[in-house]
Image: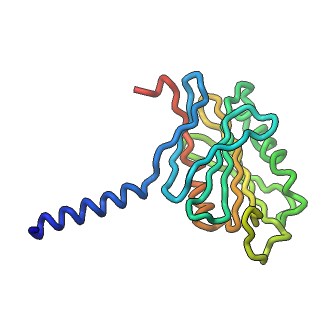
Amino acid sequence: MTIPLLRSLVVLGILSVATSALAADKTIDLGAGRAVIFDLTATLKMQTAENPEGIDGKTIKIVARNGSNAECNVTVLVDSEKRFADRDMLKDLLTLSASSMVDQSVEGKVVAREFKTPHGSGFSATFTDKNLVGQPGVAGDYKSATFVILSLPDQIGVIATILADDPQGPEFKAMMALLRSLGVRTASSVI
C-alpha cells in the first residue's frame, strides 16, 4: 500500500470516529405538526418514561451510557393556557415544583436562576441533599437535584429534573447541554 493511500485511510478512520462522537438529533413528537428536537450526545441514551401524575405531555428519561449515577427526566407539553409564556408564572412553577426539596437540602430555599437557551428561556434551581454530603455514592440515591422549567416557541413547555451525584460532573454537564439544545420544529418549518 502506498503512503498517500494509507494516510487517506487513517484520516477516514479518524473522521469516522469523530463523527460517531457527535450528537444525534432526536425528536419528541407532540402531534398536530409540532415536535421538540434535541441533541443526544454519544455519552447519553434515551429511554421511555411515565408522565408525572397530572401532566399531559411526553416524558423521556436520559441516562449516562457509562452507568454513572445520573439521570434526566424531561417532560414536554403543549402549553395551551400559555402559563409558560409568563416569566413570573414560570418562576412560580419552578418554586412549586422544587418546594419538596427545600427541607432536606443544604440550600434550604429555592434559588431560581435564569436558564437561557438559543431557543427559549426559563429558570433552574439546584439542591444538594444534606444527608448525602460526604457520603459515598449509591445507585439510585442522588446527591443533587436540578429542576428546570423552560418556555419554548409555539406554546411548548418543558419540565426537567437532573438527578446526579456531581452537579459539576461530565454527565450533569452533558444533560444540561441536552436541555439547552431543545428546540421546536413545526410542520411549517419543514422544507
Task: Report the side of 79 relative to 66 (left or right).
Answer: right
Q: Examine the rendered structure and indicate whether residue 17 appears above or below residue 93.
A: below
Instruction: Spot the residue most to the left.
Output: 2
Q: In the rendered view of the protein, which quadrant contains the C terminus? A: top left
Quarter-of-image position of residue 140: bottom right
At horizontal 79% and vertical 56% (from top left) the residue drawn is 111
154 left or right of 142? Answer: left
Q: Nearer the viewer, residue 163 or 79?
A: 163
Q: How is the protein colored in the picture?
A: rainbow
Return the x and y of residue 76 as percentages of the image width and height: 66, 37
Count the marks: how many? Answer: 0
Image spot of residue 97 (x, y percent): 81, 46
Residue at 79% across, 41% down: 93
Residue at image position (50%, 54%) is 41
152 left or right, relative to 159: left
User: Along the line of sight, which residue is nearer the eye, 179 or 59?
Assistant: 59
Residue at left offset 88%, top offset 62%: 104
Query: Outermost residue, front direction?
Result: 1
- Where residue 151 sits, quadrant-wise, is top right
Q: Nearer the viewer, residue 181 or 140?
A: 140
Could you tell me which quadrant the N terminus lies in?
A: bottom left
Q: Position of residue 158 (x, y in %)?
A: 67, 40
Whole-percent x, y for residue 134 in the image = 78, 77
